[in-house]
Amino acid sequence: MTSNPPARLFVLLARTSPVGVILRRGPSDWVQMIKWQTDTDTLEAGQWIKARLYEGSCNLSSDGKLLIYYVFQGSNWTRNPEVGMRYTAISKPPYFTALVVWPRIRSAAFIDDRTVRVWADSVQDPMFQLPHLKVVSKDYEPSIDPETQKTIDRHNWIYISNEYKAQLNGDVELFEPLDGITFPDWDNPNEYP
């Protein structure tokens, strides 16, 4: 007797409002978006998409109103050839319907509720645009808001600006290996943990 693998869940929580997004994967290449009101613990079932959605590339705005996601559509891309097989999009949870689309851009994130940083050498115009959304390149240096500064201080993190990184020219090791700990050779798949 064969059993189906369980659905996999990935949860994103908004920083400043009681909203979360649950991405439910399963069966295999299907993903459902579910909006979670964390203050009332209610769920709103949303849209399904047949694609490989990369959960690690998803980003929820701090107010929970917009979601950035990156997908690979495989053979499904022929339905919308101008977008292509891979794209980053912004939608309004719990729906995958794209409000903004960047073909072939893999990474983007919210700086604030209405500013998106796109990691690309040059920011191409998206296929669709939201009038209140500001799009900046990877070299953009945001001012640090007080809440982010508190988080940086609380975790003893160090904010390194892009200007400072350029001055380093890669001559500085960011960490020293700990005694007795070995790291796998990531170029050799036989050593993956």
Image (cartoon, grey):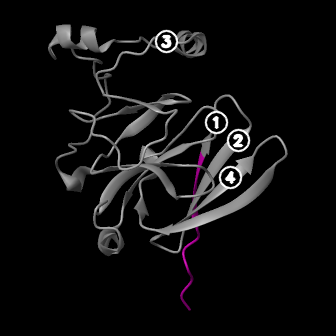
Question: Vertical placement of 64 versus 181: above or below?
Answer: below
Image-based side of 93 in relation to 119, left or right: right
Rounded to the nearest angstrom, the CA distance separating label 3 from label 4 is 29 Å
Question: Vertical placement of 111 versus 30: above or below?
Answer: above
In this orientation, which residue lies closer to the viewer: 154 or 116?
116
Figure quadrant of residue 178: top left
Quarter placement of the N terminus: bottom right
Residue that badge 2 annotates: 19
Provide the major secondary structure of the magenta segment: loop
Q: Secondary structure at mark 4?
A: strand
In the rendered image, residue 61, in percent from the top left (x then y), is placed at 57, 35
Q: Secondary structure at mark 2?
A: strand
Give the residue at x 54% y 11%: 149
Figure quadrant of residue 108: top left
- Mark 2 and mark 3 lie on one chain; the one further toward the N terminus is 2
Rounded to the nearest angstrom, the CA distance separating label 1 from label 4 is 11 Å
Question: Vertical placement of 126 versus 159: above or below?
Answer: below
- Mark 1 and mark 4 lie on one chain; the one further toward the N terminus is 1
Badge 2 vs badge 4, beta-carbon distance below 8 Å: yes
| Residue type indicated by callout 1 | Ala
The image's mark for residue 144 is: 3
| Residue type indicated by callout 2 | Val
Q: Residue furthest front?
A: 131
* Residue 16 seen in the current view: yes
Q: Secondary structure at mark 1?
A: loop
